[in-house]
Amino acid sequence: MQIFRKIGKFFRNLALSEREPRLLGYRGFGSDERVIIQGALQKTYSITNVRPENRRTSNFLNQIKRYLATPIPGATVCVHFSGMKKCVETNDNGIFMAVFDKVEKQIEPNASPWREYKLTLEHSPQQLEKDLDAPVCNKLLVPHQGQQFGVISDIDDTLLVSHSTEMIRKLKLMMLKNSYTRKPFPGVVAFYKALHKKDEGTAKNPFFYVSSSEWNLYEMLDEFCRYNEFPEGVFMLRDLQHSIFKFWKSGGGSHDHKIDKIRSILLTYNHIKFVLMGDSGQQDPDIYRRIIKDFPGRIKAVFIRKIKKKREFESEIIKDDHGNEIPFYYVKDSYEASKYALKHELITEDELNNILSDTEKEKERGAVEI
């Protein structure tokens, strides 16, 4: 009964409080030819400090707040980057996108591939209760030349245990745990670190996390990846759901937006080949087959994690329209994927041994939420 009293008090407090306007900048990406920066303007309730020791009630209430955000459409946001300025309008979901066609090249050979940008709010059609005079800063990825390949990875049930095909278990994890208490699959962090590695004379391989999770969850997913030490990368999520009555659909529905986002990555980096990571729980295999067809010669390999109730798939070699052979692997875990990655010289023998060691340790600790 105590939990119901807390929830009742939570909603009474919400009714008496105001959402504050917030300007958000998401991590952007680009090349010397084109840079894409996205963000959002919305009214949100403040999120209680997220900690590993948070109770389930606190996690539940914070998640409710994320889905009670309301967009501010029709506002003018200016993006400042590399001495340039572009002003764009927020759409019906409060999202904006700025595209810069030419970018100043980095001269320093050892300069970070991450470059800073800032946002300012120039105009809002709504009377905001709080001024947003201070600029909002974030960064974007402009990789150097010399990468071996790039990685495009799904999130739910690919690196983050989510149970997307089982509604009750999915909602239990989504609503009762937080970015510190959600679990990655055993060995996946070590595997991704190996794929991200920097060999002598090469730049680190860029990472992109493309998911059907909504932008509402951006900060939670970013915090989860930082806490678990995944390679720093660019998140590309789907449009915000601003209704508490839609949260249970998170990660579901049409996944066509993932195709559009992956295409955008491949068009931006036409000199880089990519490794695709996904799972068999939803539409990743079909999406990746379409990408192979649309971008012949651009995909090095595909790794699909088998979801427990989706084991009918078998690994195969797919030929694209140019006759290139692309290995399309269905794997039970990160260690099996890493063995295939070694076969194609995506990782080294030492890294494979590290992945095995990490996988066994994490399984012993009961790292998987199943």
Image (spheres, helix red, strand yellow):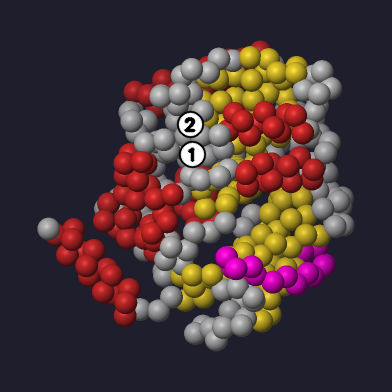
Q: Nearer the viewer, residue 154 or 190?
A: 154
Chain part drawn in magenta: 81-94
Front residue of 272/316: it is 316
Please report whichever mark, 1 or 2, sits nearer to the chain's N-terminal start: 1
Residue 303 in the image, given as x and y percentages of width and height: 59, 24
Q: Is residue 125 left or right of residue 130?
A: right
Instruction: Tell me the quarter of the picture where residue 184 sits.
Output: top left
Q: Quadrant of the N terminus?
A: bottom left
Q: Secondary structure at mark 1?
A: loop
Instruction: Indicate whether residue 89 is drawn in magenta.
Output: yes
Q: Is residue 79 above or below residue 208?
A: below
Residue that mark 1 sits on: 156
Q: 154 or 106: nearer the eye?
A: 154
Say whether residue 23 is visible: no
In this rendering, would 34 be left or right of 63? Answer: right
- For badge 2, the amino acid type reads Gly
Please report the residue visible at 27 percent of the width from the left and 51 percent of the height from the top. 56
Residue at the spot x=64%, y=25% of the render? 302
- Residue labelled with disc 2: 281
Q: Is residue 215 visible?
A: yes
Residue at 30 percent across and 58 percent down: it is 58
Residue 79: percent from left, percent from top: 73, 68
Q: Is residue 140 inside the magenta stretch?
A: no
Residue type at mark 1?
Answer: Asp
Q: Is residue 59 left or right of residue 346?
A: left
For disc 1, the neighbor class at 10 Å (few under 14, some 14 to 19, many from 20) is: many
Q: Secondary structure at mark 2?
A: loop
The relative height of residue 190 versus residue 39 in the rendered view (above or below) is above
